[in-house]
Image (cartoon, helix red, strand yellow):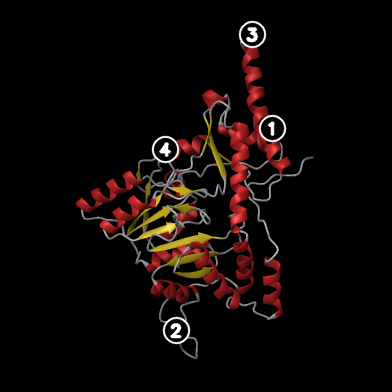
Amino acid sequence: MDKPILLSTPHMGDRELEFVKEAFETNWIAPVGPHIDAFEQEFCERTGASNAAAVSSGTAALHLALQLVGIGYGDDVFCSTLTFAASANPITYLGAKPVFIDSDRTSWNMNPELLVAALAARDRIGKLPKAVVLVHLYGQSADIEPILQACDRYEVPLIEDAAEALGATYKGRSPGTFGRIGIYSFNGNKIITTSGGGMLVSDKPELVAKAKFLATQARDPAPHYQHSEIGYNYRLSNVLAGIGRGQLWVLSDRVAARRRNFEVYQQALGNLPGIEFMPEADFGHATRWLTCLTIDPKAFGVDREQVRLALANQQIEARPVWKPLHLQPVFADCECIGGFVAEELFTQGLCLPSGSNLTDEDLERVIDAIGTVYHSNRTTHLARHL
């Protein structure tokens, strides 16, 4: 039996183990230590962020970000709808309610025109959202500039969920560094990983200092354990920060490898009827964290799900594009502005294996499997009409 080809697996370099050994040798095992400070500093140098706090997950970073901008019970928060549930779950942790915004076709991210119109409409009735959570999807930045301008116009804080977009650029800068606060994820499937972890960044040092305070159980500066606020156990460990430091060294290589995966897939499959790959917007440089495509069943002959199942039968993991959050049962009572584009992308969209450690043979297996589905269906279709 062929080995499984998974969607996106961790890819370690040479330095990670050195940093982990250093943590063990110096006994810096607790969730503090020199690797934490160095990881935060090196992350800022890599992304252009001014200040950073390493935390236990991207979800934790987003939870803190929302609390830092004052989200509370009964507030509305605008959020991209085509994303993973973790982009919206922390909104509900604080008793607020997400309002979902549809995607555009240029980047698959939040549609700036819809966001601008929605803010104007809310302003007219005196019910502006308390924040906007802008997600940068599948390694590609959203069109940040018009969204940020609209947020600034109405004094609505912009939080960037760049969990999937580390290594990408928007007009030469890192997505995640434009808004009031940006967050990143180092989950095991991301372009670099600490096994589990995240980062919160901001150009406002007081926000990052408060994030670190809240992430360390909100312990007051006293010789005894004293707490004046509710805090969280959200800090990243020194050991995992060491892994993160090693991963940062190879980030550019990982981006190059994933972009090469995309180029191989596009060259081999791009001419098949009904296949369209996620476009790369001209305002930025995408990492192609995941190679995503859409399948028009009328032109291709079978739908996305039939292709996914055919790949699964050959031990190849592929996944549908994110199910829009406004279609998720847990958010069924939430408002959505637009929705058709995200729904169509979900219906037709498929994410192919995209790990930076895929071999040429792995890519050929995926390509051959998709080609076989297309040609088998075409042969069957012709036979029925003879």
Q: Nearer the viewer, mark 3 or mark 1?
A: 1
Residue 220 badge? 2
Helix, strand or loop under label 1: helix
Q: Which mark is residue 341?
A: 4
For this rendering, which residue is in front, 339 or 200? 200
Label 2 – label 4 distance at C-alpha: 48 Å
Q: Residue beneath label 3, please?
A: 386
Residue 16 pos. (x, y %): 67, 66
Q: Position of residue 168 (x, y in %)?
A: 50, 53
Give the residue at x 50% y 76%.
216
Give the farthest residue toward the top. 386
Among the two numbered marks 3 and 1 on one chain, the one whose residue lies closer to the N terminus: 1
Marks 2 and 4: which is nearer the front? 4
Q: How many marks overall?
A: 4
Check residue 63 in the rendering and tell me which mark sits there, or answer none.
none
Residue ID for mark 1: 368
Q: Residues within 10 Å of mark 4 (few under 14, many from 20)?
A: some
Q: Residues within 10 Å of mark 2 (few under 14, many from 20)?
A: some
Gap between marks 3 and 1 measured at Cα = 27 Å
Q: Determine which quarter of the picture holds residue 126.
A: bottom left
Q: Nearer the viewer, mark 1 or mark 4?
A: 1
